[in-house]
Structure formats: structure tokens, C-alpha cells
Image (tube, rainbow, N blue to C red):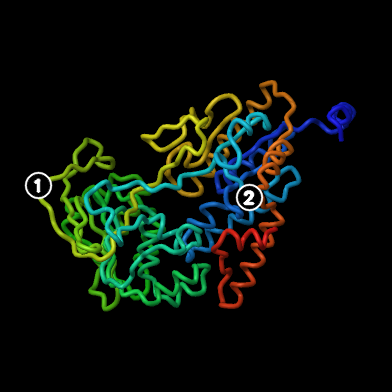
Amino acid sequence: MTKFSSIIKRLFSTQPLKKKICIIGAGPAGFYAAQHLLKCSTPLEIDIYERLPVPFGLVRFGVAPDHPEVKNVINTFTKTAQNPNVRFIGNVSLGSDISLRQLEEAYNCILLTYGAEENRKLDIPGENLPNVIPARRIVGWYNGVFDDTALPIDLNCTSVAIIGQGNVAIDVARILLTPIDLLKTTDITQHSLEALSESKIKEVHLIGRRGPLQAACTIKELREMLKLPNCGTIWNHKDFRGISEIIPNLARPRKRITELMLKSLNDQLKSEGKVFKPAFFKSPIEVLGKSRVEKIVLGINELYGDNILDQSPRLTSINEHLNCDLVVTSIGYKSVQVDPGIPFDFKTGKVQNNGGKIKKGIYATGWLATGPTGVILTTMSNAFGTAEMICHDLEQEEFSSKEGFEAINKCLEKQNKRYVTWDGWKRIDVFEQEQGKKVGKPREKVLHLEKMLEIAL
């Protein structure tokens, strides 16, 4: 069709002209935003770009394999993806395959939702020793992230120190301590299942800089950890001095999790199996070892500040040594600037934005905009809010006609870039489920990019 005939067709069409939106990132933030954008009074055509051949982001690659109920949100995302006004384009990366400038020329609106995938560092001596591993990479190892399948993790050890007390830290602790029979019916990767089945780990220390009142995990995660079969929990009584007197004044969520800790503290018994040891008021100072981790030096903290729930840690002159063979760092994620055109705050590790708006026609939501905080419901709320703002702006502002994916597809064809459609993803999905059935699992994830593309295309 010539450009002239295309214009004539649009002029005489009874269908309203659809404004073109692209979403960069097919994780929870991207799908929740798309779901809400479909409710706009302005007719929209939404293209969701994803650098991997498969959708769902952290739901697929971040949620622990023993939490299948959390992954049910995939059903909602699938309905959104199958809407006739939504297109999935996998295996296409912003910054390498396409540029922000190309997207600006092709679309009326760009929404960046590509998340936070880099781990924050401890920045202490010994951090680069073998068997000092970011929690993000261990999660990728047992969840099927391409780059983490060959993770050099040595589980031929007895003691693990996890630095951090958020939900990701507890996920890693739980997976390391869970009986193998409970894991083998999940979608955990086969290579990690085999390694865990031969693991010698007996105890996991969960180390936090502040106290019980500032622990970052949710009550659901902690309760699940405390009920883990064949695993006892040992707390330090000194960490809870004066806590019971404060409980009546706490808000309900913090009150409930603190009461759960105190109940576990009072009920704790010596375990004949594995042991979970939460520890407070400690900061990592140095990792010691010759050819690998042998111990970690922990500084003892005191807290200061008027708000008891938000006090800051301050090192004292007291240190202690903890013998351990594996150190896992779980102190948060940060985003990266994938394209030089994205205004980025390198200090905070997130895109510069005002409540989700970067500038006219460009927005961000999810961890890229807020930093890595909250759970999936937090991301949903944030994505809905940003999508609502986009809908309002689209209704108020004048937008010119854009080509959308037609323009980007021309760029991809010039590069001979292969992309994966939603039908391609469905072929991968069916293949993984069929492989899983052979070993009694819900799915066996494909672990190599070329194999995925072969199945999808």
C-alpha cells in the first residue's frame, strides 16, 4: 500500500484513529499498566517490548518456585496480552536493538517499565572472594535466568551468612533449607535441584543492620520460614530487650510481625535438623578467606533517632567473627540506564521522574521509577496510577498520527533481528509444560536463548 492510499484509507475509515503506545518491559509493572490503559476512553494500540523471548519478568524469574500461588497473576496478564489492541514483541532490547529516539518517532507515548536488575554491593574487603554471591543471582540460578544457569555456587558447606532481611533474603534462606522432596514438584530448575539435593548446609544466618522493629520482610514470608519442616529457628534473646513493652504502641502490621517473632523466641527448641538464625544489630565489615570464604567480620550496631521504627544504625567499637562458607548479599537492587536518552539518577539507581512522568510523552513505572520497594500489589497500584495519568494526558493533549510497530519493524528487519510474538511465547510455554510433566513438575524451563528462539520461531 502506498503512503497516499494509506492516508486515504484513514480519512474514510469509520474506525477512530488509535494512538500508539509502547511499553518497555513485560513484567508486572508493564502488564498492569497495559491492563489499565485498555480502559482509557482514548482508543489505543499498545505494544509491549521485552528483551527476553518470554514475558512476565519477576513473576517468572523472581518469585520463588515454592510460591506457585503468587504466579497465578499470569492468568490476568495473559488476558491482557490476548486483547486485540495489545501486541507482545519479545527478544528486543531498548538500547541495543532499538533506541529511545526511534521509539519517540514511532509512538505517541512511551512507558518504561524495565525494572531493576543490578544488585547493590556491600563495598567491603573480601567481597570478591569465591562463594560471595548476590541473592539476585541465586534467585536467577534456581528460576532459570540464562546468565545464572552456570552460577559458581558451592553448597558443599555447612554455614551460610545472608546479609539482608527482606523477602528476597528469606526466599533464598528458605530454598537453601527446604527439604528436597518439597522442591522437586515445583518449577525449580533441574540443575539447582540436583545441587540442592547434595547440599551440606546445616545453618543459615539472616543478618540485619537494625533491630526487630525494622525488619524488612513481610509476616507471610517470616511465618512460612518459621514453619519450615525439619528446621528450627534460633533467635538471640538480647536482640529483643524492651521490645515487649513497645508492642502495644505499634501499628497493626508491625505489631503482628513483632508478636510473631516474640512467640517464636519463647517457643524455640533445639533442632535436630537444620537451623535458621536471624540476627540483628550487625553490619558486615570484611569477608575473610584465602581461596574462598571462611568467615565474615560483623560490626555491632547501636540505633539512634527519635522515630523508633525508623532509627539508623551506627557502628560501635565491637566486632565479632562468624564462621561461614557462603555469603549471600541481599541489600537491594538498582536499575540501569539502558539508553543514553533516558534521564537517570545514578546515585539512587532509578530514572528521573515526577510521579511517573519523565517528560511529555515519556513515562516510567514500577521499580525503574520508584526503586525496588514493595511487593507485586505495590507495583500494581503504582502502574495503575501512572496509566491513569497517561490516559488523562492523552485526552488533554494533541497527538499526531504515528506508525507504531510498523516503523520499528522496519528497523528490526534491517538488522535481521528475530523477535518473538505472543504465539511464539505460547509455543515455548507448551514445550516447557510438556517437559515438566516428564519429571512430575509444572514446567521445566528452557535455559538457553537459542533453544527458546528455535521453539518460538
Query: Neighbour class for label 2 at 10 Å: few (<14), some, many (≥20)?
Result: many
Quarter occupied by residue 34:
top right
* Residue 115 to residue 323: above or below: above
Rendered position, 319 above or below 25: below
Residue at 53% of width from left, 41% of height from top? 381
- Is residue 280 shown left or right of residue 175? left
Q: Which tag, 1 or 2, sits closer to the chain's start?
A: 2
> Which residue is nearer to you in this view: 307 or 185?
185
Q: Secondary structure at mark 2?
A: strand
Horizontal side of residue 180 vs 61, given as left or right:
left
Say what amino acid the circle numbered 1 marks: Ser
- Reading the image, the residue beneath label 1 is 317
- Quadrant where the N terminus sits is top right
Q: Residue 447: image x %, image y %?
A: 54, 63
Tell me the amino acid under the disc marked 2: Gly
* Residue 41 coordinates in the image, percent (x, y): 72, 32
* 128 relative to 414 in the view: left or right: left
| The image quarter in which residue 9 lies | top right
In the drawing, does residue 77 fall left or right of residue 313? right
Say which mark, if any, is on residue 90. Answer: 2
